[in-house]
Image (tube, grey):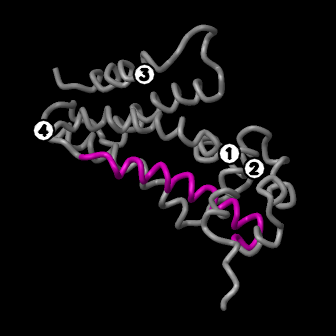
Amino acid sequence: MPRPKTHDDALRVRLLDRAGELLSSEGPGALSLRRLAADVNTSTTAVYSLFGGKPALLDSLYEEAFRRFGDRLAALPQTDDPVEDIIGIGLTYRASALADPQFYLVMFSKVIPNFEPSEETEAAAADTFVPLVENVGRAIECGLFIDAPHEQIALALWGMVHGLVSLELNGNLPPGVEIGPAYERAIRACADGWRRR
């Protein structure tokens, strides 16, 4: 009878989640393979078996973060109204960040100095911007948005939601102010700024 596989995908995911937590809450100095293994109640051998070392662990962490985000974006249905689809992307951006806050800093900051993800992982990250660009293009083509470079409008929208979500996750909102009630209105206001009059 074969030995049971102990270094499975569930362990891999737990290690990546914990690595993201350590990086986002304590910084890169907190992420050692020994501590990571201890925190997840496994061995450093398991970490090496699954990832091959710290550089591959970091690349896998980055890839997992963008995969989860990309999966959430891919699950959005496309409607006949590209502006509403853009609003849906903005709402999904925040929902994804709140569901996996341990990955947000990994995805959108240089939390690991001098770390360069693999080309494949960078391509997967870039792919998460594509649905927004495509829907902006649809909005321009059907006359809802002004005729401007798709990427320019998409970047403005992306930057607005990124800013609000970053303030929320980093605890930098003014005292007593909640972003949740105003978040969708903010996205709609930004989108309305690009409408053809």
Rendered residue at 34%/50% (across/down) = 75
State the count of labels.
Answer: 4
Secondary element under disc 4, as helix, strand or loop, is loop
Classify mark 1: residues with Cα within 10 Å, few (<14), some (14-19) or many (20+): few
Q: Is residue 181 left or right of residue 143?
A: right
Q: Is residue 3 magenta?
A: no
Q: Amino acid at mark 2?
A: Pro
Magenta stretch containing residue 51, yes or no? yes
Identify the mark nearer the N-term, 1 or 3. Answer: 1
**Marking on residue 110:** 1
| Element class at badge 3 | helix
Name the residue located 65 percent from the left edge and 28 percent from the top edge: 170
Q: Secondary structure at mark 1?
A: loop
Q: Residue 166, percent across and down?
A: 58, 30
* Residue type for callout 4: Cys
Residue at point 31% right, 23% down? 188
Q: For marks 2 and 3, give the one nearer the viewer.
A: 3
**CA separation, marks 1 and 2?**
6 Å
Question: What residue sits 31% from the left and 46% below the top?
Answer: 76
Residue 105: x, y in percent? 64, 41
Q: Earlier in the sequence, mark 4 or mark 1?
A: 1
Residue behind mark 2: 113
